[in-house]
Amino acid sequence: MATKKQIIIPIVILAAGIAAMAIFSNMKKPPEEKEKVDKTPIVAVQNISVAPMTLEVNSYGMVKPKYETELVAQVNGEIVELNDVFVRGGFVKEGQLLARIDPSDYQAALIDAQAKMATARAALETELAQGKVAEREWKLITNTSPTELSLRKPQLAQELARVKAAQASVLRAERNLERTEIRAPYNAMIDSRNIGLGSFVGVGSKIGHVLGTATAEIRLPVADNQLAFLVKTESTEQGVNAPVNLIGTYAGQDTQWQAIIARSEGVIDSKSRMSYLVAEINDPYLLNSSSDSSDVPLRFGSYVNAKIMGYDISQASLVPRYLVVNGKVALLDNESKLHYAVIDIVRQQGSDVIVTNGLQDGDQLIVSALDYPVDGMKLAVASDVLQLEEKDIETEKSETQMANNIESGE
């Protein structure tokens, strides 16, 4: 039989354990409530601008004169005169004297030819008079028809041929005398001079080289697939008469000139596989007085980039190419949800594409990447989230400042 002590000790131990458990339970802090985390994906957006647009085709080329001429001597002789402007870079007018070959021999040849022509004319007049006398005498002798020989017609024809030969000699002598003067064939700039004062030239000797200053032209290579963006009419080829912006440098400054496509070469180059359009610009050196003093000349040999104006699009927008997937782009709609819009791409322009349909002015284009995009999913804009965080920080600062003010007042 258990003693009283054996019964009381377990009860005391049990009561002590219950009391200790109650004390420890009261000492335990309740778990802190975790703040709710917003897992809405945050994206960056960009507003779409839809406006009229003119397509452009980029190209490049070298400025060259439309006309250039190699001057050569057409007669033999010594150079006895040179114009001061007949130097490289000099500007000359059409018909201006550049150099003169010694004309003495050709002046003498002209005088000789003129003398021979005068002699031939005198002989012709004499033969005409003798023919009339013969005809009159023949009528007095007989009533029969005279022969051509009796009327001296063969002699008359011979004298007439001599007169024509003398006239040809005079013309030849006059032409050779004119050729002793080397004149500019048109308004030009001197590219080179190959003669000096006192030098002797023969027929075919190179005198110099001139570049026409009335019109400059630039051959512009264009890829065949880019011709589709240029205007074509029934009477002209693709791109002909299109305006062109030429971009180059003058005195270290970026400068633009306006030109126009004058013609197409009509073939594809066998090496570059490019089509060539030829742009022209009038008065490249601004030699006409009507030119604006603020303009700068477009020098021959300059390298220029060209923007050929194509056809107009009434409503178009630019979209970064990397944002287009399978002909669609991601948009953020008015309810801050993801929406995919199907677009029509006209062409690629650098790192962008030109879109004509599928976008509206003011649409918000998502420009950041989404890990698991689902059409219709809820999204948050990065700028909005940043504004909320800044607002929370400002609120927290205000509450802290208020608490400090209260403590300092106590």
Image (spheres, grey):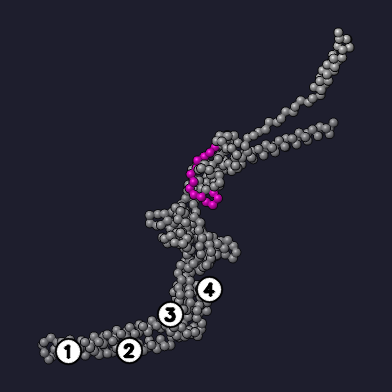
Q: Which residues are magenta?
A: 339-352
For marks 2 and 1, give the CA distance.
28 Å
Residue type beneath disc 3: Gly
Q: Residue 288, position in %: x, y?
A: 49, 68
Residue in the image at 60% along x and 39% along y: 371
Residue in the image at 25% along x and 87% along y: 158
Residue 383 seen in this snapshot: yes
Left or right, 186 with reference to 35: left
Quarter of the figure that contains the N terminus: top right
Residue 264 seen in this snapshot: no
Q: Is residue 14 above or below residue 106?
A: above
Residue in the image at 33% along x and 89% along y: 116
Few, some or many C-alpha atoms within 10 Å of disc 4 (few <14, some 14-19, many ≥20)? some
Q: Residue placed farthest to the left in the image?
A: 143
The residue where tag 3 is placed is 204
Q: Residue 29, position in %: x, y?
A: 78, 26
Q: Earlier in the sequence, mark 3 or mark 1?
A: 1
The residue where tag 1 is placed is 150
Residue type beneath disc 2: Lys
Q: Which residue is more in the foreground, 88 or 214?
A: 88
Q: Earlier in the sequence, mark 3 or mark 4?
A: 4
Residue type beneath disc 4: Gly
